[in-house]
Image (cartoon, rainbow, N blue to C red):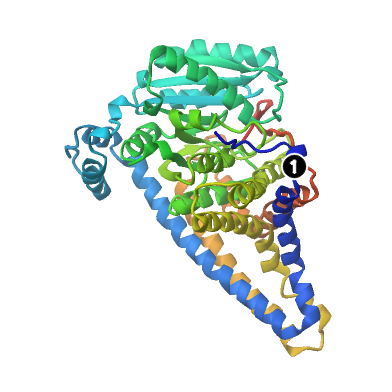
Amino acid sequence: MRTIEIPQPDERDWRYRAFEILPGALTWLILLSPLILGLIGPQITAVFVLAYLIFWLFRGIGVSLRALQANRLVAEHKAAPWTGLNQDLEDLVPHTKKAPNWHYRNLKRVEKYIGASRIKPSEVYHVVMVLFWNESRDILVPTIQSIVDSNYDGKKMILVLGYEQRGGPEIEATADYLIKKFGKHFYHAMAVMHPWPMAGEIIGKGGNATYAARELKKYLAKVKLDPMHVLVTTLDADNRPDRNYFAALTYTYCSTEEPRYASYQPVTLYLNNIWDAPAPMRVIATGNSMWNTMLALRPHMLRNFSAHSQPMAALIDTDFWSVRTIVEDGHQYWRTFFRYDGKHEVYPIFTPIYQDAVLADTYRRTLKMQFIQLRRWAWGASDIAYVGYNSFIKKNNISKRLLIVRFFRLLESHVSWSTAPLIILIAAYPLLFLHPQSYLANQLPHLASRLQLFALVLGVSVSLYISFKTLPPKPEHYRRHRTIWILLQWAYLPFVSILYGAFSAIYSQTRLMLGWYIGWLIPTEKAVKGERPSTSTL
């Protein structure tokens, strides 16, 4: 069986390095393009800038409309009668009253295309793998309590606590405490310590998850549970599933035609501590929540991110997660894609998993931790080299058309991340400095500013609407004026788009281009309000 692991840095030849250089090189070329084109002539620069702004204006309108549509779907799926829908799926008979229209279509499709080979909801076991390093009980207890409180039979669930030896004796005591406190609610509960150091691993979540999953594999063999009947969901310490998440996941899994080749991605909403986080972090958290919600309507763009689910059989086939990257969640999509020769899809789950916005013990440290979190996400650009090399250099049995489409979507998403906010903001001005006497050069900033203003008003309006629709109840210790600051926080939007959005991606892509690899995961500190800070690998 051919390897699907990321090569070590000293194993990467010039072709692999060329793919690593590509996103950073394109980013800097695009950022310099207004200046380069301005030296050539005003007309070509004006055409480029206006075309770029108009393209992103229409793209922004599309994103806003999808975000509104997806937000309605999240509300619908949170309220759906999943217990009844699963029973209907079990019997292939529609008993549930007032079920959504898509439910009846699913029943017919499952009966017609899956038939006797299907996995019934009653046959599914869920493994909930909570991974942590040195998080406090104040972070972990609410997470596990949310799993216990799920509208799902706990005796069909297995709790796996994966913790790090490098967290010290305190974290081991925490794991033991959690097993004793919550273990009785589950079919089985186990705590697995990930030893450190481990040869060939970087400091990251992938090693912890993989080590715990290998222990889980032994347990499943012992109790003779079919890995195709076991769904594994990975959670960080602060990830709290919606009450209906596991029921919705079961329904989706049992109505998937080829579940071995599927991953399941919930909508991620950063709402746990949204009232406590500083205003810039609230803007980023709300924006990320909107983006994740919108992506659920574009399955062809979905990738594993943070909390995600996959059948145990597929994890075994991929030898679990990569232990050589700090972005093991998104990389798991590509790892599975190449293991199954391109036969892999991600299905959205519209019932959300709630996570924390960044909040450290001081305001200044919170700002720093937010940038560290986003630059880690942006390190997903390292997958461009992995995908390019495995697609076009190594032999494979995947359609070239599929490989080209997937590769360029990945490349475009990371280059747009690093360049779009800056180009939209400043691209009209280099021409004015280069050709101050040109009428076209003088008019271009005015035209650009009108487009920018329209896009900003649209984005803020949609963000305001969705943020107030999804905002959890205000904690009692906050006064009414806190709501006013929730409204005024959107003045930070241009600032955070540039400083945190574009700059984090530029930073990561430039490091990758220069071969300055991020070989360790810096956990994002997260403090409980009024308590000492904790860390999370989110």
Please report the residue visible at 33 percent of the width from the left and 42 percent of the height from the top. Answer: 257
Relative to 167, residue 266 above or below: below
Disc 1, SS: helix
Please report the residue visible at 48 percent of the width from the left and 20 percent of the height from the top. Answer: 217
Please report the residue visible at 63 percent of the width from the left and 13 percent of the height from the top. Answer: 172
Could you tell me if residue 39 is visible in this image?
A: yes
- Residue count near mark 1 (Cα–Cα under 10 Å), binned few <14, some 14–19, many ≥20: some
Query: Is 519 placed left or right of 181 in the picture?
Result: right
- On the rendered image, what quadrant is the C terminus found in? top right
Could you tell me if residue 432 is visible in this image?
A: no
Q: Mark 1 highlights which residue?
A: 368
Question: In the rendered image, which quarter is residue 246 located in?
Answer: top left
Query: Which amino acid does the dot numbered 1 rest on?
Result: Lys
Q: Nearer the viewer, residue 14 or 229?
A: 14
Please report the residue visible at 56 percent of the width from the left and 24 percent of the height from the top. Answer: 140
Query: Is 147 placed left or right of 253 in the picture?
Result: right
Q: Nearer the viewer, residue 116 or 429?
A: 116
